[in-house]
Image (cartoon, grey):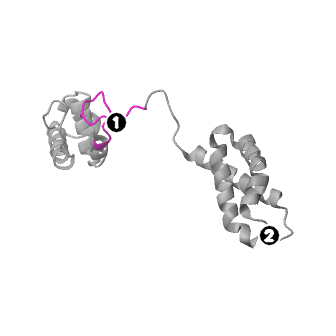
Amino acid sequence: MRPFEQIVADYGPVVLRVCRAVLGPVDAEDAWSETFLAALKAYPDLPGDANVEAWLVTIAHRKAIDATRARARGPVAVAAPPERPAATGRPEQWDGDLWAALRELPAKQRAAVAYHYLAGLPYKEIAAITGGSTDAARRAAADGIRRLRATYPLSTSDEGGTR
């Protein structure tokens, strides 16, 4: 069995060419290093009559597949980061927590809060839409707002106040 240093010297350029051809110049050297690290671990168990070059190219191929998969799972650079949900509570900005708290309200309370506080409808029109009395619409909106105040987390706004 030849010394492993001799294996690296004899087949290193071939393995590097394979890695460059499959992965390109950026990731080729890492794949080459990982190929020979894996080969070093398995070399003592390699049969004496094995084709060392084919064995190394097989390992390099598998390392190239690993590198390609890792590259596909990695982050992708973009020109501008995507917009994030707003935490300020302003209607023109997205606030996922507020919408989640609103979704937890019973249907009548949610509708009354949305129609009155978001659409600006008077309670009489809300009663006509939801099928109840004006007082029931007012009560549902008040109960919904009270429940939102209890369940929606308080946070500090940009101006230093709390909402």
**Vertical arrangement, residue 33 with respect to residue 102, above or below:** below
Q: Which residues are magenta?
A: 82-97
**Which sits earlier in the primary sequence, circle 1 or circle 2?**
2
Task: Name which quarter of the figure residue 155 lies in.
Answer: top left
* Residue topped by disc 1: 85
- In the rendered image, the residue lying farthest to the right is 49
Q: Is residue 84 magenta?
A: yes
C-alpha gap between disc 1 and disc 2: 63 Å
Q: Residue at x 30, y 37 (%)?
A: 95
Q: Residue 32 lies in magenta, yes or no? A: no
List x then y, in percent, for residue 107: 29, 46
Secondary element under disc 1, as helix, strand or loop, is loop
For the N terminus, the quadrant is bottom right
Q: Callout 2: 10 Å neighbours few (<14), some, many (20+)?
A: few
Q: Which residue is mark 2?
A: 1
| Between 70 and 100, the one nearer to me in the picture | 70
* Overall secondary structure of the magenta section: loop
Q: Is residue 61 above or below residue 116?
A: below
Q: Quadrant of residue 127?
A: top left
